[in-house]
Image (cartoon, rainbow, N blue to C red):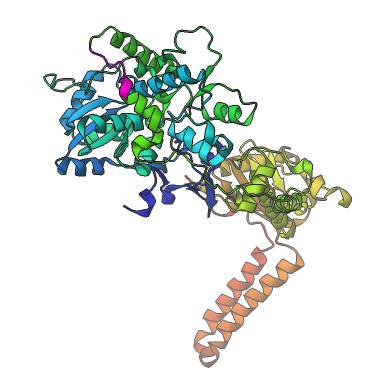
């Protein structure tokens, strides 16, 4: 297995753009920006899958484990599916055909993960009966378990003393059919892959609905055109009410103690990572907390396609459960095994209970934070805009990330904008020619002092950096009488160059595109100045001298040709100060020099 696919989620670096959306949406900021690429810090990640769904470029990828299942098929061992109850919302209208498709793919049996959920609820009911209450945080969601392990280690002892429904279901299948089986979970959750990685056999492999749908497509198995003669069978039986686990409050409703109560004060449900983090960070209650990382529950997991709305998916699960309750021979628990689950806890997996993980929590002094803020161009509290463009909630959070080595100064939008503006201002202020940049409405976006000096007579004290900014947004026509000439340049692939007279001087204006059809620049230069005249004379004189030296030996035969070249060179010098075809008194008569190619 390649290093990039060791983890359930990884980044396709080559296609990663510096948008920082994954930083913004990651609830625990388990993202490192390095060379403008967003890398997942797996030791901090809770594998909730938020970045997978939010990445606009699709570079946050779910590890595909279908090949491992195909290898299991070749092992000749019995391969059993642990099917998440949310399949009825993902494949609504094709529920039975989806089960048939699993058999067609090659699975030997299909069992419902909700059987494990029923056993978990049965075990916790036993605990409440014996102890009066169960003030635990549920372990149904592996992403929440990771969250507690890494970010709320003080609540490790509050995690329910029983494994997740999937782990319990896997243990139950091994209890029924022995260890010579391969258990493959299929569901909406990426974090279930972590359970398979950390506790091999409970289950062995985990696939998301997305992976299975892609697999079906590759095998040309269509749910609307499948052999209905394939029986829809579940082992050891169909799941009952516990199939409601994938929606918020489902675990509580499955309990025979907490169910059907208008208000249950000793068992509370919270879904969505922000709500869970708020609950754990705030005033903690002494009640059972049913926690599901995804808003609304597993039906909205990152491994789903979310074709239907959340409310539609919720109704699909609820309707399915109501139908199941009227069917015969549904699974109603196993008291003896539930007792084993309660007694052994994670021991039924031959594993230890979850332990707190040492996630680096850097602590920085105020002096260090201020130093980092200075690198971000924040010289005072007023500069701390907390715009969130970098992905962090506040500028100080960004500064801490910079100190921790997981962010880069280029992530600060305001800093990059200020740097860009500073470079443009520096460039414009040092150019000896007049420069103006206009938008497609012919309003000034930027300009320099030289441009103003050419056309208007303003006090020197007014034309500092702040004074020049006051011209931004003004129509360029307030300076140049040929503003409409700017408009036509927007639609040329190669903007033109012109000459014109202004106050006795010969000016050259060169247009250039800054941003296609959005921003246009124009550079004005006085080509009748002594400096320009001297440089032009020197250039032409050197050209003449070079040619003269090459003809010394052949002066007689080449005299006529050399004289002609000398005349042409001198005439071009005259042209430098003359607007061809323009009357000497006709200011602003634009004469095109070159360019002007249309698109």
Residue 181: percent from left, percent from top = 21, 37
Query: Does residue 596 appear in the picture of this structure?
Result: no
**Could you say which quadrant of the image residue 396 lies in?**
top right
Residue 103: percent from left, percent from top = 17, 28
Instruction: Specify whether residue 187 is painted magenta.
Output: no
Query: Does residue 236 appear in the picture of this structure?
Result: yes
Observer-nearest of 315 and 133: 133
Instruction: Specify whether residue 331 is painted magenta.
Output: yes
Observer-nearest of 547 and 59: 59
Q: Main secondary structure of the magenta part?
A: loop
Observer-nearest of 212 and 533: 212
547 w.r.t. 105: above or below: below
Residue in the picture at 67% in, 41% down: 483
Q: How many marks?
A: 0
Q: Left or right of 84: which side holds 439?
A: right
Residue in the picture at 26% in, 35% down: 183
Q: Which residues are magenta?
A: 329-336
146 w.r.t. 125: above or below: below
Q: Left or right of 330: which side holds 11?
A: right
Q: Left or right of 208: which side holds 141?
A: right
């Amino acid at each position: 297995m390649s290093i990039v696919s060791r983890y359930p989620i990884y980044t396709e670096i080559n296609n990663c753009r510096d948008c920082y959306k994954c930083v913004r949406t990651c609830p625990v900021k388990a993202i490192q920006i390095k060379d403008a690429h967003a890398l997942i810090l797996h030791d901090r990640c809770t594998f909730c899958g938020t970045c997978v769904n939010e990445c606009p470029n699709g570079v946050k990828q779910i590890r595909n484990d279908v090949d491992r299942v195909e290898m299991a098929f070749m092992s000749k061992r019995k391969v059993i599916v642990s099917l998440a109850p949310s399949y009825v919302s993902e494949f609504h209208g094709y529920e039975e055909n989806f089960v048939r498709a699993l058999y067609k793919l090659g699975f030997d049996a299909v069992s419902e993960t909700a059987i494990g959920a029923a056993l978990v609820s049965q075990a916790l009911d036993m605990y409440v009966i014996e102890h009066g209450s169960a003030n635990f945080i549920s372990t149904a969601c592996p992403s929440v378990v990771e969250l507690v392990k890494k970010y709320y280690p003080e609540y490790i002892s509050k995690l329910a003393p029983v494994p997740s429904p999937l782990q319990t279901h896997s243990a139950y299948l091994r209890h029924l059919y022995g260890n010579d089986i391969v258990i493959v979970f299929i569901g909406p959750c990426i974090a279930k892959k972590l359970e398979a990685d950390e506790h091999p056999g409970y289950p062995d492999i985990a696939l998301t609905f997305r992976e299975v749908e892609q697999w079906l497509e590759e095998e040309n198995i269509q749910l609307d055109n499948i052999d209905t003669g394939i029986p829809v069978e579940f082992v050891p039986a169909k799941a009952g009410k516990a199939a409601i686990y994938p929606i918020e409050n489902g675990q509580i409703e499955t309990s025979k103690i907490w169910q059907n109560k208008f208000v249950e004060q000793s068992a509370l449900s919270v879904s969505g990572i922000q709500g869970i983090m708020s609950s754990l960070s705030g005033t903690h209650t002494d009640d059972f907390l049913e926690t599901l990382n995804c808003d609304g529950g597993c039906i909205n997991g990152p491994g789903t396609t979310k074709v239907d709305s959340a409310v539609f998916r919720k109704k699909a699960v609820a309707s399915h459960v109501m139908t199941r309750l009227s069917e015969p021979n549904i699974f109603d628990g196993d008291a003896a095994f539930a007792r084993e689950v309660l007694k052994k806890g994670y021991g039924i997996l031959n594993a230890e209970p979850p332990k707190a993980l040492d996630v680096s929590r850097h602590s920085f002094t105020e002096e260090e934070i201020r130093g980092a803020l200075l690198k971000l161009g924040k010289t005072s509290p007023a500069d701390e805009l907390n715009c969130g463009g970098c992905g962090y909630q506040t500028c100080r959070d960004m500064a801490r990330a910079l100190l921790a080595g997981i962010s880069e100064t280029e992530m600060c939008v305001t800093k990059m904008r200020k740097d860009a503006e500073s470079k443009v201002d520096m460039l414009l202020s040092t150019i000896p020619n007049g420069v103006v940049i206009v938008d497609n409405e012919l309003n000034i976006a930027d300009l320099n002092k030289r441009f103003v000096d050419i056309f208007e007579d303003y006090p020197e004290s007014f034309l500092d950096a702040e004074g020049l900014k006051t011209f931004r947004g003004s129509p360029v026509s307030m300076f140049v009488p040929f503003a409409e000439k700017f408009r036509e340049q927007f639609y040329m692939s190669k903007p033109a160059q012109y000459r014109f007279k202004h106050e006795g001087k010969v000016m050259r204006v060169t247009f250039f595109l800054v941003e296609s059809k959005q921003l246009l620049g124009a550079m004005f230069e006085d080509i009748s100045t002594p400096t320009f005249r001297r440089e032009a004379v020197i250039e032409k004189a050197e050209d003449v001298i070079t040619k003269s030296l090459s003809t010394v030996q052949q002066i007689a035969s080449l005299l006529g040709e050399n004289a002609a070249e000398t005349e042409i060179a001198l005439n071009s010098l005259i042209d430098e100060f003359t607007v061809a075809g323009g009357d000497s008194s006709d200011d602003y008569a634009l004469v095109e020099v070159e360019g002007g190619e249309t698109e």
